[in-house]
Amino acid sequence: MKTRMMIPAATLLLVAGLPAQKRDEHVWDNLRELKAGQKIEIVQMNLKSESGAFQQYTEEGITLRNAKGEVAIAKCDVFRVSSLAKSHRLRNTLIGAAIGAGAGIAVGALIDSSGSESGEYLFTSLGLLFGGGGGAAAGAGMAGHPTVYRAAKRTDVRK
């Protein structure tokens, strides 16, 4: 009977630990996802950042428009490009909390129903608490402003 309870719990933990499918951020051609006028932030290799409206990109560099006018940055000087679209951190936190709480309640109820006869819902309550908290943390941990491009680590730099 205890083995029957452990299988759903182990499956839930395994699935929750699987990494999400993610694109390779080190590909310059990811910039094709950006639309002209979209708000972006470019962090340069010297860690100076520029924000503004995306204009275009080529194999040589990227151009944006901000209060200074049109700013062109060479590809070799670009450390990271992020989209400044509206952040969905709160939404992701709430969705994560709901999914985690639901999963925690389901596993806790399964354990409670096959355990004691006293009618206490200890594991259901713990599942709600820890599942909801863990899900909220996972949702909040999702990127606020997605990185579209990140330069690969340079191997030609001396230490």
Image (cartoon, helix red, strand yellow):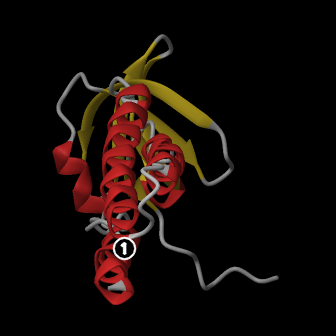
| Numbered label tally | 1
In the rendered view, does 20 fall on the left or right side of 152? left
Q: Is residue 108 above or below residue 57?
A: below
Q: Quadrant of residue 1?
A: bottom left
In the rendered view, does 118 fall on the left or right side of 20? right
Query: x%, y% of residue 94?
Result: 38, 31
Q: Which amino acid is tagged 1?
A: Ala
Residue at 77% over, 83% down:
158
Residue named by callout 1:
9
Query: x%, y% of residue 15?
Result: 30, 72
CA neighbours of label 1 inside 10 A, class few (<14), some (14 to 19), many (20+): some
The outermost residue toward the right is 159
Q: Is residue 121 visible?
A: yes
Residue at 32% over, 54% down:
103
In the rendered view, does 127 fall on the left or right side of 48? left
In terms of depth relative to the viewer, which is nearer, 116 or 59?
116
In terms of depth relative to the viewer, which is nearer, 116 or 41?
116
Name the quarter where the C terminus is drawn. bottom right
The outermost residue toward the front is 117
Query: x%, y% of residue 45?
Result: 62, 54
Which secondary structure lies at badge 1? Answer: helix
The outermost residue toward the bottom is 3
Q: Is residue 16 above or below residue 38?
A: below
Residue at 17% over, 33% down:
35
Q: Is residue 93 above or below residue 128?
A: above
The outermost residue toward the top is 67
Q: Is residue 58 visible?
A: no
Query: x%, y% of residue 38?
Result: 26, 25
